[in-house]
Image (spheres, rainbow, N blue to C red):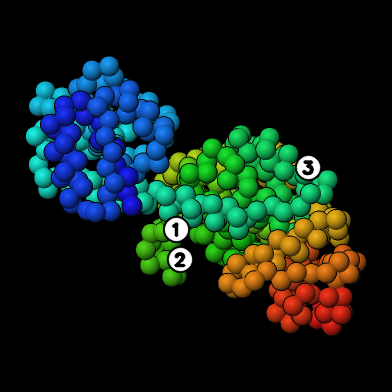
Amino acid sequence: MSKILIIEDEAAIRRVLVKIISEENKAYEVIEAEDGIQGIEMIKENELDLVLCDIKMPKMDGVEVLQHAKKLKPELPFLMISGHGDLDTAVQTMKLGAFDYISKPPDLNRLLNAVRNALDVKELVVENKKLKKQISKNYEMVGESTSIQSIKEIIEKVAATDARVLITGPNGTGKELVAHWIHEKSDRNKGPMIEVNCAAIPSELIESELFGHKKGSFTGAVSDKAGKFEAANGGTIFLDEVGDMSLSAQAKVLRALQESKVTRVGDEKDIKVNVRVVAATNKNLLKEIEEGRFREDLYHRLAVILIKVPALNERRDDIPILIKFFAEKIAEEQGSVVKLFDEKAISLLQEYDWTGNIRELRNVVERLIILGDKVVSENDVKMFASK
């Protein structure tokens, strides 16, 4: 049921609005306030989906109510009710965040359409917030070891800045989780997070993928195409396995970092971009520099902040926490009851040599959940988790 507040000092108009909206949809619960001060109190006390607010009122006018309410509940939509002489003010309220305005006397269809549209937008905002929470949960950093706590502390310090970050560590350790948390906790989190796996793209296509191309610039370029840097404008680009990038692509990335602009393959026009770069690699880039496979100047541009993600074998104390986390996540995905692991099973898993790191542990936990007993035992681990 949608809860709607009407703030209107004229009782007759208030009654008409209540009657129109209540009769339109039985799922609308309508409550009333006779002035702006009472309206603010009701906004504080109620979970509302929409507010209809008059502009000209004693004690506190509609503009003041809107400004106060947007500080309290920024996502709460407002429909402003304006008299003939209030139209300029009504337009001003749109700039302050009002969804729409309705002129007096209200046109029935116009009013109801505005109410429906405002409620639809509110529902979309709520769904997007839920989705964002789900996305964040997918990239949750799990662990209480000293090394993981240290990484979380660095992220808290660096996220609010635009400093470039280079994340190092073996495959499967969760370098992409670190990148996502940096983005989630930054001021850019409303912008895009664009991921590029540099190792998965053929070297002859990496420049087109990163910077885009102009139609006809090479065989198969049948139309103009924007690159990943353009797509990430206003947000973050994550260059995963950056150590596998070709030297020619490295030169263009360096220019993009130095000048904040890119040029599509086959074009001469520069395109300005506002992008934060986070990179990751499983390679020793200093060794790659010595052997001429990675540019030293690019390394220093990327490695303003260095974060090393440890192998799972270096943080065995986190394994019980990770097992519980994966068991709960798998149960949620499969719509099943969470399967427990007994202490001996967990102890044995802590002794394993996890060459595949977190990714391997997750696969083993899923295998044991599928093949193991109601409570996963030491025997289950010996039988189904052996290498």
The front one of 102 and 54 is 54
Compared with 328, 120 (above or below) is above
Q: Position of residue 161 (x, y in %)?
A: 61, 34
Q: Mark 3, residues whose alpha carbon is within 10 Å: few (<14), some, or many (≥20)? A: few
Q: In the current view of this chain or complex, which residue is farthest to the top?
A: 59
Q: Position of residue 17 (x, y in %)?
A: 17, 39
Residue position marked by numbered label 3 in the rendering: 150
Q: Position of residue 229 (x, y in %)?
A: 51, 50
Tell me what residue is drawn at x 76 percent, y 64 percent: 323
- Determine contact: label 1, label 3, CB under 8 Å: no
Residue position marked by numbered label 1 in the rendering: 213
Rendered-image quadrant of the C terminus: bottom right
Three-letter amino acid code at the position of disc 1: His
Q: Can residue 315 be seen in the rendering of this structure?
A: yes
Q: Mark 1, residues whose alpha carbon is within 10 Å: few (<14), some, or many (≥20)? A: many
The front one of 167 and 344 is 344
Residue position marked by numbered label 2 in the rendering: 218
The front one of 7 and 234 is 7
